[in-house]
Image: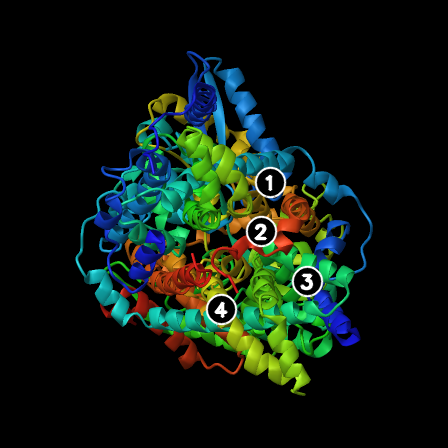
């Protein structure tokens, strides 16, 4: 009972009161701290520290080559000023938003389609297509990039069914990289949405069917609302995955002609490693961290509520 | 509930854990080599895939160097450090390696455009006293010596240069009624020939002209840079004002040429121009398959069609393909224009054994190694004597002979880090012209100006 | 059911379409980016399973193994601590851990390069450790959530039997939370196997380069061997596919999100 009380208290945003629980166990939990030590040390030294240092670098004039690569100094908000004036940065933000929106919609729709269709199809077909979708997800990024480059370039497989010179990659770069991302993430979404779909109580569906409601109406007004938390989790995870997907776009288009696929991770890499302006590239990376953090926070809020509600519902 | 006893790990686990830990730690700290007691280890960083025509020849040349050196200097050992990836990746990796003395290679084969930046960071050792004692340095033409000299000191030694010329298919020219051998005297002559091919020889690309950003600064080197150096104003970076030129009569002439080619349908298809392998598409595909009439291309094509490199083997090369130097826009003297850029050997300032390091450079620069490097990578060797050696000339006729001749008329691209920005701006402009042929010269200039201004600031650009 | 089957077949084909080139080009003597009937040859597959590339695959394997061990071991211990022990500010820590999941690795590359460079750790195994650490936040989350669902009675019984903490973890909790731990391990392995940017920057020694770097090198080489690229890509992706087949039962259960998505 204690656990549930404390956990629900924190759900309401109050600070965890250790003191209440320490009534049972006085003193610091040394074994617990020791168990946490390896993970904490590793994360601190190899994750938190570098991120902090990278944050600092964003406010310096460090370059990859040249005198400022060795002797660089803190420049205050000079880089931030540059950010404000940089039209390419704003374009990059916009492209990132487009890429994320397109990916999330695409992945969710395809994942949901797979999950729904699989519910009522032959077992062998389910296993086969499921395997293909998941293999597509597990393929390493460079393989996905190579495969999709070949698929969409002039003379590639897609060009067999498209008019003109068949060069989809160069005519619709953002569309193609988004499709590639959807293709390589849909399997993951299919798994999540399948398990959420399975958890929809069949009695509710059957009751609606007996009332004569059409299947698609049931889907829209009954199934989807029940699956809402799953869908939200799915959306947030796909967003985080897509934000991190640097290799795919970089290898396929290196930013594209006219910077048409220059999403923020690619632009940050370009500034740092092509133009050698590491400081400015780091600042762009910092912006990326802030954006990721917002989405991660939303995911945390969505994910934290679930287990507690379930525990309480189970009458623990 | 009773407090859980604080007991540390049971003994067997401790043993296993500590063994594992030690093993992992040891594996990560023990250096791969250098345990050979007493021998001086000279590390040399280079590209195993980007410089030579084929990866096999790269392996062959570098392994041979290692053997020759270790035979000649029994107390020394060569450790080869190959750097994977394309041009940008190589530069990036090298810049990361140089940040700490422990990872800095003693010797490096580095592309010419970045040497100035390396010097500015204090990474390279001045070589004046060393090159004075060699028998080959004096044969280097001034323009090549200059590309490696900064503040009056020599910081690198050329391992070979690339320059550019016009390739043309003699059969197509004869079919179109154009003169063979072809000797264009100005840019109008080139356009006329392209137009005639377009009219008389269907189904081939009239002219290959690099456009777009897919291959980085190499695109300028093998494309627009050559034209700019043969225009009325070839300035890219104004050293006097320290500003980048984004609008000039020269730039307008170059973009005007691009406009003619692409708006009249005389150019290649986009998927080839924008491919990540655009710098080799002409030599591996378009020319041997007779799909293009005129190519503004690099000198490395010549050797590739021969039996040794065979990338691809094209035994008809000498009878079908002719070469001509690129003329100036209006035929001004000397009426031969080309960019000159290559790869150079340099020694690290922090190397603990400079003498052995330069001994390696000296070995790599001798006649037989220089000529092999040149033939197998498509270079013109630094030494003008080697450049005229029969072994070189006959390796890729008639290309190599012309390449060696025109080197002295070449110019160097600005060896500054921000050249990457300017070059991306110009290639955005040419790429847009290729993709949207209705783009006007004014619009193209606008693209270049906006891009460079946005990246470097208003105070770093100028119009001439 | 027929309609569903038909739709599923269509979806399946759409997923297979891009992979078609991979299979055809890997056995085509005249491979290029285009799709064409192959002039059959085994040369590319031979190259992909020989010397250089095989060495790269072995490197990738070691790197991924180290990453998995680092991430799973510290994740299991830490996950148990976060799930069962009194950790100050635990909820805050969990939130922080989840924030870390969202941070793009690219931003950490330069500082990590400098740190590793200073201690002469720019090689395969330290890179594996770093990759393990980048998967650690997600692993911690997965394992802790899995352990949360393990009933406490069994542990309490073990405590009464005077078992030590480590024994409890190893013999009671972990086995019951195995789906979550396995998920974390698989996730870490796949992430490390596919890692591109990190090894590109951190590893310089040619003999230590992993698979993706070699394939990337082939794409930007002076002479592109498309057939080799295709064959290498297939061989390189095979272990991951095999892993999926071996673990397909747990995956089909969607247990990945077992803790966070209770319907």
Tell me where residue B1 appears, x and y as whole percent.
34, 38
Residue denoted by label 4: A257
- At which x and y percent is residue B87? 48, 49
> On the rendered image, what quadrant is the C terminus of chain B found in?
bottom left
Q: Which residue is mark 2?
A: A140
Q: CA distance from mark 2 to mark 3?
A: 15 Å
Q: Chain of mark 4?
A: A
Report the residue at 39% width, 69% height from top. Answer: A92
State the CA–CA distance, disc 4 to disc 1. Answer: 34 Å
Q: Which mark is residue C18?
A: 3
* Label 3 crowd (10 A; few <14 / some 14-19 / many >=20): many
Front of the two marks 4 and 3: 3
Secondary element under disc 4, as helix, strand or loop, is helix
Q: Secondary structure at mark 1?
A: helix
Q: Is residue B106 visible?
A: yes
Q: Is residue C202 visible?
A: no
Mark 1 highlights which residue?
B375
**Horizontal side, residue B190 vs residue B430: left or right:** right
Q: Which is nearer the eye, B385 or A112?
A: A112
- List x then y, in percent, for residue C226: 67, 52
């Amino acid at each position: 009972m204690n656990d549930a009380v404390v956990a629900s208290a924190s759900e309401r945003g109050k600070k965890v009161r250790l003191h209440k629980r320490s009534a049972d166990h006085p003193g610091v939990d040394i074994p617990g701290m020791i168990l946490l030590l390896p993970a904490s040390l590793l994360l601190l030294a190899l994750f938190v520290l570098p991120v902090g240092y990278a944050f600092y670098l964003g406010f310096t004039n460090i370059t990859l080559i040249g005198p400022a690569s060795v002797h660089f100094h803190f420049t205050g908000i000079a880089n931030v000023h540059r950010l404000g004036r940089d039209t390419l940065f704003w374009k990059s933000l916009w492209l990132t938003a487009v890429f994320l929106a397109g990916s999330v919609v695409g992945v969710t729709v395809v994942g949901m389609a797979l999950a729904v269709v699989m519910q009522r199809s032959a077992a062998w077909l389910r296993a086969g297509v499921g395997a293909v979708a998941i293999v597509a997800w597990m393929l390493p990024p460079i393989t996905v990039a190579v495969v999709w480059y070949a698929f969409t370039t002039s003379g590639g497989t897609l060009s067999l069914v498209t008019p003109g010179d068949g060069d989809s990659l160069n005519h619709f770069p953002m569309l193609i990289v988004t499709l590639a991302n959807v293709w390589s993430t849909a399997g993951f979404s299919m798994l999540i949405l399948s398990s959420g779909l399975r958890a929809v109580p069949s009695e509710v569906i059957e009751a609606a069917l007996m009332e004569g409601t059409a299947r698609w109406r049931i889907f829209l007004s009954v199934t989807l609302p029940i699956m809402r938390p799953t869908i939200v989790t799915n959306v947030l995870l796909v967003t985080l995955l897509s934000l991190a997907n640097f290799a795919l776009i970089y290898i396929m288009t290196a930013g594209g002609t006219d910077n048409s696929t220059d999403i923020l991770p690619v632009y940050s890499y370009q500034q740092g490693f092509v133009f050698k302006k590491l400081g400015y590239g780091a600042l762009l990376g910092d912006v990326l961290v802030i954006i990721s953090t917002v989405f991660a926070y939303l995911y945390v809020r969505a994910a934290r509520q679930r287990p507690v509600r379930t525990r309480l519902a189970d009458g623990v | 509930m009773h407090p859980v006893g604080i007991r540390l790990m049971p003994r067997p686990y401790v043993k296993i854990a500590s063994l594992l830990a030690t093993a992992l730690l040891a594996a990560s700290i023990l250096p791969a080599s250098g345990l050979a007691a007493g021998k001086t280890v000279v590390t040399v960083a280079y590209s195993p895939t980007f410089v030579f025509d084929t990866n096999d020849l790269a392996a062959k040349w570098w392994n041979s160097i290692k053997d020759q050196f270790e035979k000649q200097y029994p107390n020394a050992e060569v450790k080869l450090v190959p750097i994977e990836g394309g041009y940008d990746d190589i530069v990036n990796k090298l810049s990361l390696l140089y940040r700490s003395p422990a990872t800095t290679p003693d010797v490096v084969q580095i592309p010419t455009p970045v040497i100035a930046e390396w010097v500015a960071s204090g990474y390279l050792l001045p070589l004046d006293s060393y090159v004075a004692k060699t028998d080959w340095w004096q044969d280097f033409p001034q323009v090549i010596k200059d590309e490696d000299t900064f503040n009056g000191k020599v910081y690198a030694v050329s391992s070979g240069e690339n320059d550019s010329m016009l390739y043309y298919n003699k059969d197509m020219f004869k079919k179109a009624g154009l003169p063979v051998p072809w000797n264009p005297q100005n840019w109008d002559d080139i356009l006329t020939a392209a137009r005639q091919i377009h009219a008389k020889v269907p189904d081939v690309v009239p002219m290959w002209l690099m456009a777009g950003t897919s291959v980085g600064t190499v695109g300028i080197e093998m494309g627009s840079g050559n034209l700019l150096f043969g225009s009325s104003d070839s300035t890219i970076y104004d050293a006097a004002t320290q500003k980048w030129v984004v609008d000039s009569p020269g730039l307008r002439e170059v973009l005007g040429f691009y406009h003619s080619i692409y708006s009249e349908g005389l150019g290649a298809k986009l998927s080839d121009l924008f491919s990540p392998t655009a710098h080799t598409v002409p030599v591996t595909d378009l020319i041997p398959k007779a799909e293009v009439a005129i190519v503004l291309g690099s000198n490395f094509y010549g050797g590739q069609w021969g039996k040794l490199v065979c990338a691809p083997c094209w035994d008809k090369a000498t009878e079908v393909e002719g070469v001509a130097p690129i003329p100036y826009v209006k035929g001004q003297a000397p009426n031969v224009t080309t960019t000159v850029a290559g790869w150079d050997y340099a020694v690290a300032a922090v190397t603990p054994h400079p003498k052995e390091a330069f001994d390696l450079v000296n070995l790599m620069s001798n006649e037989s190694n220089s000529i092999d490097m040149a033939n197998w990578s498509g270079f013109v060797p630094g030494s003008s004597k080697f450049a005229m050696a029969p072994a070189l000339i006959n390796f890729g006729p008639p290309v190599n002979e012309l390449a060696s001749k025109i080197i002295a008329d070449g110019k160097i691209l600005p060896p500054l880090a921000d050249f990457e920005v300017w070059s991306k701006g110009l290639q955005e402009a040419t790429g847009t012209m290729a993709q949207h042929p209705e783009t006007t010269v004014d619009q193209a200039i606008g693209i270049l100006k906006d891009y460079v201004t946005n990246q470097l600031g208003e105070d770093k650009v100028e119009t001439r | 059911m027929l309609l569903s089957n038909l739709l599923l077949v269509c979806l399946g084909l759409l997923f297979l379409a891009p992979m078609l080139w991979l299979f055809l080009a890997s056995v085509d003597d005249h491979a290029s980016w285009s799709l064409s009937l192959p002039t059959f040859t085994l040369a590319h597959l031979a190259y992909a399973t020989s010397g250089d590339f095989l060495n790269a695959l072995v490197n990738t394997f070691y790197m991924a193994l180290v990453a998995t061990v680092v991430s799973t071991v510290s994740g299991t211990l830490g996950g148990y601590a976060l799930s069962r022990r009194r950790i100050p500010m635990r909820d805050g820590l969990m939130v922080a851990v989840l924030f870390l999941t969202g941070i793009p690795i690219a931003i950490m590359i330069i500082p990590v390069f400098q740190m590793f460079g200073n201690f002469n750790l720019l090689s395969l195994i330290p890179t594996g450790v770093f990759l393990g650490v980048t998967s650690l936040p997600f692993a911690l989350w997965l394992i802790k959530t899995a352990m949360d669902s393990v009933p406490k009675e069994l542990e309490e019984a073990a405590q009464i039997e005077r078992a030590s903490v480590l024994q409890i973890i190893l013999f009671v909790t972990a086995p019951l939370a195995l789906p979550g731990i396995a998920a974390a391990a698989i996730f870490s392995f796949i992430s490390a196997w596919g890692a591109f940017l990190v090894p590109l920057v951190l590893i310089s020694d040619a003999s230590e380069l992993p698979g993706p770097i070699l394939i990337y090198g082939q794409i930007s080489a002076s002479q592109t061997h498309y057939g080799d690229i295709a064959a290498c890509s297939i061989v390189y992706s095979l272990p991951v596919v095999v892993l999926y087949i071996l673990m397909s039962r747990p995956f089909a259960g969607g247990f990945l999100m077992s803790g966070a998505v209770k319907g």
